Image: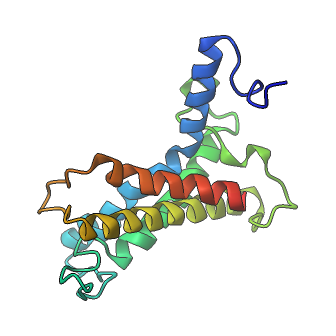
Amino acid sequence: MDVLSPFLPGDPAISALNILSVLMMYGPFYLANTGAMLFGKWIPEKLGFSSITIDGGRNWRDGFRLLGDGKTWNGLLGGAVFSGLLTMFAHYLWLGRLSPDARPFVDPTLLSGPDDWFWVGGEWGAAFAMGFTLGLACMIGDTTGSFIKRRRGLKREGDESSKAPLLDTAPFAIAIFVAAFALF
C-alpha cells in the first residue's frame, strides 16, 4: 500500500481540495507577516513611537547589518499576536456562524482537545496559543531568511523587495510547517 494514498486520491478535484484546505488552515500563520508590518512599521509611524530593531544596529563580521531596520521586536511579537487573533477569528467563523462555503479559513483547533499542551483557557485560549506559536515560528523563519539574504548581499532597498523570491517566502513557510509538525 502506498503511504501517500490517503492524502493523494485519484480524483484531481479532491487533491486540489486537500491542498486548499491546508492553505486555508495555515492562512492565519502566513498572515503573521502582515501583522509584523502593521505592528513593526505602520502603527508606530502613525502613532509616533519608535520600533526597536532586533539587531540593535549591530553589524556581522561581513560589515553589513545583522538584519536591518525592517526587523523589529515590535513586528516580531506583533506578527505572532496578530496570528493568534486571526486563529481565534477562524475558530469563531467555524462555530456555525457562517456557511461552510463562506469560511475563509479552516479552524486549526478542530483536531485538538483538553489533553493538548496548548489547551489553556479552553478552546479560545488554545486557538490563540496555536496561532501565536505558529505565528512566532513564521516570524523566526522570516528573520532567518533576512539574515541569509544579507549574508548573500540581497538586502532590501527601501520599500523594494530583494531579488530572492524563494528567500522571501520559503524560510517562514518551512518554519511554520516544522513547528506545526513538532509541536502540534
Picture residue at 36% right of the left edge, 75% below the top: 74
Picture residue at 67% right of the left edge, 46% below the top: 108
Is residue 132 visible from the viewing direction of this image?
yes
State the image quarter where residue 47 is shown.
bottom left
Q: Of 85 and 111, which appears nearest the observer?
A: 111
Q: As drawn, which residue projects farthest toward the left?
A: 158
Q: Position of residue 117 (x, y in %)?
A: 79, 67
**In which quadrant will I find the C terminus?**
bottom right
Q: Position of residue 12 (x, y in %)?
A: 60, 13
Question: Which colour assignment does the render follow?
Answer: rainbow
**In which quadrant will I find the N terminus?**
top right
Picture residue at 25% right of the left edge, 69% below the top: 150
Q: As drawn, which residue projects farthest toward the top?
A: 11
Q: Position of residue 124 (x, y in %)?
A: 69, 58
Residue 60 to residue 152: above or below:
below
How many labels sit on residues? Answer: 0
Tell whether 126 sits left or right of 40. Answer: right
Q: As drawn, which residue projects farthest toward the right?
A: 115
State the image quarter where residue 113 is shown.
bottom right
Q: Of 23 and 156, which appears nearest the observer?
A: 156
Q: Position of residue 159 (x, y in %)?
A: 14, 58
Residue 20 to residue 39: above or below:
above
Is residue 105 visible from the viewing direction of this image?
no
Tell whether 108 sits left or right of 122. Answer: left
Residue 111 to residue 162: above or below:
above
Picture residue at 59% right of the left edge, 41% below the top: 25
